[in-house]
């Protein structure tokens, strides 16, 4: 009897944690309406792939088919042993568009056995172009191809990467940069993209170890676009030259202050654009992970120590009114992160929890188009978590109860440190089913993932199934 008392609950927990071989993600977990009203249509979480009045399928949430492409590219992914390449290299080719362009990219999977997708990280694309296997499309299997179409409405620095078995494929190299230039750009002498990535234990910039040299003349104005493709924070510091943080996660900073002797911390998945003027002796920019960038001459000839302080974006720059009211949101959501023992799909271990539940017993955050919602992200675990919401940008309102006083701090990738609590406001203006997960990608595989779902939207795809869709 004593044995049964112990074994029976464990057996029930194991059984109840098992996921089916194929399932509609929109029917998993439980609906959280954030204290706001439910739609009168009766649509509710769990309707999944069923038909309903006025509902739209994820697969139909696309860019206007009548628009012709301004920018086209074909990206061919290949398995090259310890690397997955895009058009024969990793990182893949840098894609560049101008504000308002219709971008059309064809993904061709030559031989990546698990399949592949392309997620446009930080770009608020139509839901069907978001590139999440089992949620917004089926994985593209060997010999197959898939066409992504979206209007590049947001100026800034972004990147693309696989969202099929992402914790493996991104680390192996299936990623690249994306820049959207303004239609009426301000002149800049040097515009450089620096993708930070570790292959195994080796730190790289744009795939190269050590120091990368960039040609520039004294007096040149530089825009350095730093993209963190790793699972942890990347730190960057220009040595001995004043600089400004021009943009964060693709959004320009209002009234950026000049900074000297501080570093900038870039969350996993995040981006920062730094601006500086090249002095006579040149500029050295050092990165955590052992890589460096010299612009013009090298003023030091060696790596410099990391500064002891980092730029605090909560108070950096000049304040400005937000584009929507945040004081009285339509919905408020809790996103409490912790960890506890249990079973995840039949596997025992220590797993991440969302609001106390192990995946899939986690909230589906439900909204209606036009809602203003506020997320309170509370990290009660012993690890930091770079949280990434697809399809939207959030406005940071406060950290640990301290209001933001600087430039409006817009993020799609937010580092939530141990014990920290952030309030982030989001305008629900992009219908679909959207991942909201930790971008330390192994954490996502360990259950740190939830979704934002619009009323009136139904699923078109299933996790698992014939395509083996596994987004994390």
Image (cartoon, rainbow, N blue to C red):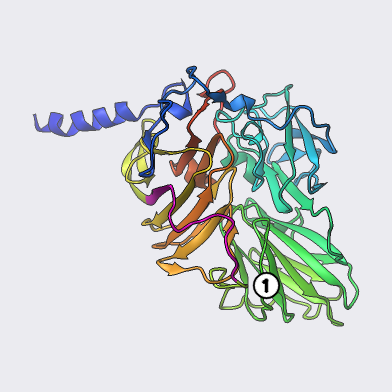
Q: Quadrant of the N terminus?
A: top left
Most foreground residue, 105 or 375: 375
| Percent coordinates x, y for residue 388 in the rendering | 54, 49
| Percent coordinates x, y for residue 77 in the rendering | 74, 34
Q: Which residues are magenta?
A: 319-337
Q: Secondary structure at mark 1?
A: loop
User: For the stretch drawn in magenta, what is the main secondary structure?
Assistant: loop
Above or below: residue 423 compared with residue 4: below
**Mark 1 surroundings: few (<14), some (14-19) or many (≥20) residues within 10 A:** some
The reply, left or right, for residue 450 in relation to residue 244 is left
Above or below: residue 48 compared with residue 334: above
Which residue is disc 1 drawn over? Answer: 256
Q: Does the magenta run of residues contain 332?
A: yes
| Percent coordinates x, y for residue 358 in the rendering | 36, 39
| Percent coordinates x, y for residue 378 in the rendering | 39, 56
Above or below: residue 109 compared with residue 119: above
Res 439 visible: no
Identify the residue shown where x is 84% and y is 64%: 186
Most foreground residue, 362 or 309: 362
Identify the residue shown where x is 75% and y is 45%: 90
Res 283 visible: yes
The reply, left or right, for residue 113 in relation to residue 28 is right
Most foreground residue, 178 or 305: 178
* Residue found at the very far right of the displayed protein: 217
């Amino acid at each position: 009897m004593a044995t049964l008392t112990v074994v029976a609950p464990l057996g029930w927990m194991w059984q109840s944690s098992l996921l089916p071989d194929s399932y509609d993600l929109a029917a998993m977990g439980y609906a959280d309406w954030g204290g706001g009203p439910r739609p009168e249509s009766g649509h509710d979480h769990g309707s999944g792939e069923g038909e309903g009045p006025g509902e739209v399928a994820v697969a139909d949430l696309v860019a206007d088919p009548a628009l012709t492409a301004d920018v086209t590219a074909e990206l061919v992914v290949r398995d090259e042993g310890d690397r997955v390449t895009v058009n024969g290299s990793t990182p893949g080719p840098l894609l560049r568009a101008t504000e308002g362009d219709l971008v059309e990219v064809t993904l061709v999977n030559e031989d990546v056995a698990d399949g592949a997708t392309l997620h446009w990280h930080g770009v608020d694309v139509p839901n069907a172009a978001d590139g999440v296997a089992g949620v917004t499309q089926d994985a593209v299997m060997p010999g197959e191809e898939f066409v992504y179409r979206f209007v590049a409405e947001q100026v800034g620095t972004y990147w693309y990467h696989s969202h099929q078995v992402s914790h493996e494929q991104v680390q192996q190299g299936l990623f690249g940069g994306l820049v959207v230039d303004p239609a009426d750009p301000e002149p800049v002498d040097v515009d450089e993209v620096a993708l930070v990535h570790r292959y195994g234990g080796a730190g790289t910039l744009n795939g190269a170890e050590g120091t990368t040299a960039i040609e520039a003349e004294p007096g040149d104005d530089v825009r350095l676009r730093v993209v963190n493709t790793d699972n942890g924070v990347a730190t960057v510091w220009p040595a001995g030259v004043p600089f400004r943080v021009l943009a964060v996660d693709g959004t320009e900073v209002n009234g950026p202050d000049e900074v000297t002797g501080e570093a900038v911390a870039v969350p996993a998945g995040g981006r920062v654009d730094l601006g500086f003027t090249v002095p006579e002796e040149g500029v050295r920019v050092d990165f955590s992970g052992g890589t460096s960038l010299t612009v013009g001459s090298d003023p030091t000839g060696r790596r410099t120590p990391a500064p002891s302080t980092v730029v605090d974006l909560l108070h950096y720059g000049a304040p400005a009114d937000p584009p929507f009211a945040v004081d009285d949101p339509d919905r408020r959501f809790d996103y409490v992160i912790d960890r506890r023992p249990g079973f995840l799909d039949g596997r025992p271990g220590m797993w991440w929890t969302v609001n106390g539940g192990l995946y899939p017993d986690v909230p589906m955050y439900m909204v209606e188009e036009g809602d203003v919602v506020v997320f309170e992200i509370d990290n009660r675990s012993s690890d930091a978590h770079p949280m990434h919401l697809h399809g939207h940008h959030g406005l940071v309102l406060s950290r640990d109860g301290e209001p933001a006083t600087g430039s409006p701090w817009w993020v799609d990738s937010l580092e939530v440190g141990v014990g920290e609590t952030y309030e982030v406001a989001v305008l629900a203006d992009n219908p679909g089913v959207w991942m909201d997960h930790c971008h330390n990608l192994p954490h996502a595989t360990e259950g740190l993932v939830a979704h934002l779902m619009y009323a009136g939207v139904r699923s078109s795809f299933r996790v698992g199934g014939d395509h083996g869709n596994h987004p994390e």
